[in-house]
Amino acid sequence: MSSFTVQEQLHEAQQGRIQGQRCGGCGHPQFTLAVRCAQCGSPNLTLQNFSPKGTVVSFTVVEVPVELFRAEVPYGFVIVQLDDGPRIAGWMPSVRSAQDIRIGDSVRLTPSSRPTIQFEKL
Ligand SMILES: [Zn+2]
């Protein structure tokens, strides 16, 4: 088990890189760092870089934000299925209304000055 932390993971994401774990037992990819596989319970997990590209599987447009994003509304909050990894959540400042995004859109992780995961359309 590596000493990779959630803070380091978020820092990597801010640079446009997604790291998580893949189970050596069943192959399950996971973004949430853990000591066991969420699918099969195996402790045989290794760090892996996942593709920063993926597909929008769900979204909403946020009009009432958390404090950090008060000046950003409206914006998109998306769930993305990474091409070779897990589903992860992030925000899309380019989405200003539901007309700006569709389920199935191709997106990519993009570097962000915010302590969060940011996507842009491809
Ligand atoms: Zn597993």
Image (tube, grey):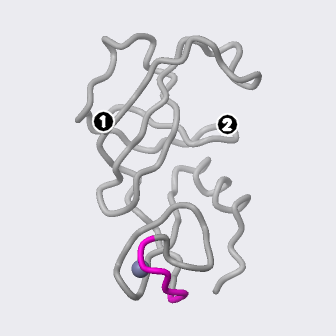
Looking at numbered disc 1 in the image, what kind of residue is underneath it? Answer: Leu
38 w.r.t. 17: above or below: below
34 sits left or right of 83 in the view: right
* Quarter where residue 35 is shown: bottom right
Which residue is labeled 1 in the image? 122
Ligand 1 within 8 angstroms of badge 1 C-beta: no
Residue at the spot 56% in from the left edge and 79% down from the top edge: 36
What residue occupies the far left of the structure in this picture? 104
72 w.r.t. 105: above or below: above
99 sits left or right of 59 in the view: left
For this rendering, which residue is in front, 58 or 118?
58
Residue at the spot 61% in from the left edge and 47% down from the top edge: 14
Q: Give the range drawn in magenta.
A: 39-44
Looking at numbered disc 2 in the image, what kind of residue is underneath it? Answer: Ser
Residue at the spot 52% in from the left edge and 67% down from the top edge: 20
Q: In which quarter of the image is ligand 1?
A: bottom left
Q: Position of residue 13 (x, y in %)?
A: 58, 52
70 sits left or right of 52 in the view: right
14 sits left or right of 58 in the view: right
Q: Where is residue 120 in the image (x, y as percent from the top left)?
A: 41, 33
What is the tally of numbered marks visible in this picture?
2
Which residue is labeled 2 in the image? 113
Q: Is the magenta stretch mostly helix, strand or loop?
A: loop
Quarter of the figure with the N terminus: bottom right
Q: Where is residue 24 in the image (x, y as percent from the top left)?
A: 41, 87
Q: Does label 2 or label 1 sit earlier along the sequence?
A: 2
Q: Position of residue 102 (x, y in %)?
A: 27, 25
